[in-house]
Image (cartoon, grey):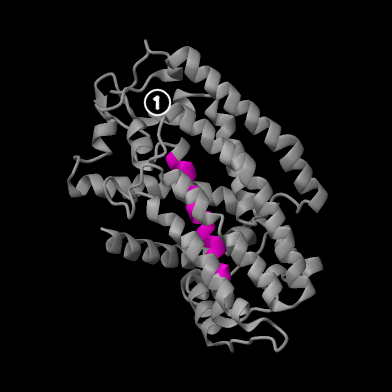
Amino acid sequence: MFIWSFIVTLVVILTYAIFVVYAERKAAAFVQDRLGPVEVGPKGILQTVADLIKLLQKEDIVPTASDKILFRLAPWLIFTAIFWGFTALPWVPGLVGSNLPSGIFMIFAVVSLDVIGLFMVGWGANNKYALFGAVRSIAQIISYEIPLGLCLLAVVTFTGTLNLQEIAQQQSIDTTFHSSLFGIPGIDVSAWGGVFTWNIIRFPVLLPVAALFFIATLAECNRAPFDIPEAESELVAGFHTEYSGFRFGMLFLSEYAMMLLVAILLVFLFLGAWSSPLPNIAGVKLYDWTSGTTGQLSSYVWSIVWLGGKTIAVIFWQIMLRWTFPRLRVDQLMHLCWKLFLPLSMLLVLVSAIWKWFLIS
C-alpha cells in the first residue's frame, strides 16, 4: 500500500504542477486583460511542458563561493519534507500511505522541516539577497504556523481525532458516526449527508476557522499577498536567486506541491473530504447517486471526482488572490499574524471548546 501511495502521490504532484502553472498563467492573463500562453500547442496548453524541458536542459550552476554541500542538498530536503506530508493523506477511502492515528500532527510536524531547507538555501548560496529572502521566509512560516496549529486544534476539538480517515468519515453517511446539525443532539443529519455533514455547516464556528486557516496557508506557501520572501522587485528572486536548472525546478515544484497539500488538507478538515456535496432529502437520494457503491470502483471514482473538484476550487482561489491583492510589507505581515490572527485563533479555540462542552458532551 505504501509503494502504491508513493507512486500515486508523485504522479499526481507532477501532473498537477504542469496543469496548474498553465492555469495560473491563463488566469493572470484574464485578470490583466491579455492572452497568456498561446504559441505552443492548442491554446498554449503545451507551453508549460516546453518550459519544463528547457529548464531541465539548463546548466546546473553552483556558485564558487557557496557552501557546495548545503547548496546541493537544500532543494532535496525542502521537496522531501513537503512530499512526506502527503503520506498521511487518504486519496480515496482506504488508500493512504500511512494511516496514523495522529496523521494531522505528523503532517504538521514534517512539513515544518522545510524551514531547515530554506535556511540551507539562503546560507549555502552565500548571496545576501538569497539570505534576506530565506530569513524573511523562515520568520513568516514560523510565525503563521502558530495560528495555523490553533486552527487545527479547533477542528480536532470537535472531531475528537487526529486521523484524517475518521474526519472524512464523520462528514459522510456513516453508521459508525452520528452527525448533529450545529452540535445539537436532537437534529441528526447522519442520513442526509452532503453539505449538511460538512464541518463548517455542522459547527458554524469552524467557518471563520476555515477562513483563517486558508489565509495562514497562503503565508505558509509564500503565496501573494504573502510572497515577501520572493519579492522580485527588491530581492531579485528571493531565497532561490542563485539556483538554476533542475534544482530551481525542485524549489518551484515544492511551492506548488505545498499549495496542493494545504488545499487537500482544508478540504478534509472543513469541506467534507471526498464525500458528495449533494444530500439525501425527501426521498431524493442525491448523495447515494453521486457516491457510488461502498468498496466498488464507482465509489473510488466518485471520491476522486469530489476530492479533486473541491481541491481545484481551493487552488483556484489561491491563484486568483495573487492577482487581486498587493503584496504586504514585512511589518504588516507580522502585525497581521501576531496582533490579529494569533488572538483570533486563540479565541476560536476557546469558543470551540465551550461549544463542544455545553452542546455535545
Quadrant assignment, res 273: top left
Residue 35, visible in the rendered structure? no
Per the image, is 246 magenta? no
**Considering the image in quadrants, where does the C terminus appear?**
top left
- Residue 65 screen position, x and y as percent: 73, 86
Residue of label 1: 196
First to last magenta residue range: 251-268
Asked whether 199 or 65 is in front, the reply is 65
Q: Residues within 10 Å of mark 1 (few under 14, many from 20)?
A: many
**Considering the image in quadrants, where does the N terminus appear?**
bottom left
Residue 326, visible in the rendered structure? yes
Relative to 278, is 315 on the left or the right? right
Residue sitting at x 44%, y 24%: 202
Asked whether 209 or 29 is in front, the reply is 209
Residue sitting at x 68%, y 58%: 138
Asked whether 258 or 88 is in front, the reply is 88
